[in-house]
Amino acid sequence: MDLETDEKTILLNWDLGVLGFSKSGDEILFEGRPNEKSPWAIYIINIDGTNLRHLAYFDDFLEEWYADAREY
C-alpha cells in the first residue's frame, strides 16, 4: 500500500503471511504457498514485486516436515 495515496498493489495472489521487512524497507519476508497443493515455504520479495526468491535454506526442513502429509 502506498502510504501517501492509500493505493493498494497486489504483489502475489497467494496464501501468505508477512513475517517482516528488511531494515531498509525494500524487501518483504513472508511464508506462503502459490497454490493449495504447494507446501508452505519462506520467501523474500522486493517491495515493488520484483525479484521473488525462495529461501532454499529451508528446503530440507520443509521436505522432511511434509514427507508424511497426504495432501498439503
Image (cartoon, rainbow, N blue to C red):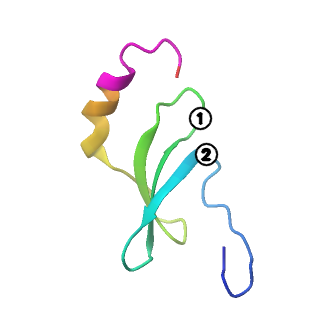
- The answer to whether 42 appears left or right of 70 in the picture is left
Where residue 29 appears, as percent x and y from the top left, is 43, 59
How many numbered badges does the structure rendering display? 2
Vertical side of 39 occupied by 72: above or below: above
Determine the residue positioned at 46% across, 36% down: 40
Vertical side of 34 occupied by 60: above or below: above
Assess whether mark 1 and mark 2 are in contact (beta carbons under 8 angstroms).
yes
Provide the residue designation for mark 2.
14
Q: Main secondary structure of the magenta part?
A: loop
Provide the residue designation for mark 1.
35
Where residue 64 appears, as percent x and y from the top left, is 29, 23
The N terminus is located in which quarter?
A: bottom right
* Distance Cα–Cα, label 2 vs label 1: 7 Å
- The answer to whether 52 appears left or right of 36 in the picture is left
Residue 61 lies in quadrant: top left
- Start and end of the magenta stretch? 64-71
**Residue 65 magenta-drawn?**
yes
Residue 23 lies in quadrant: bottom left
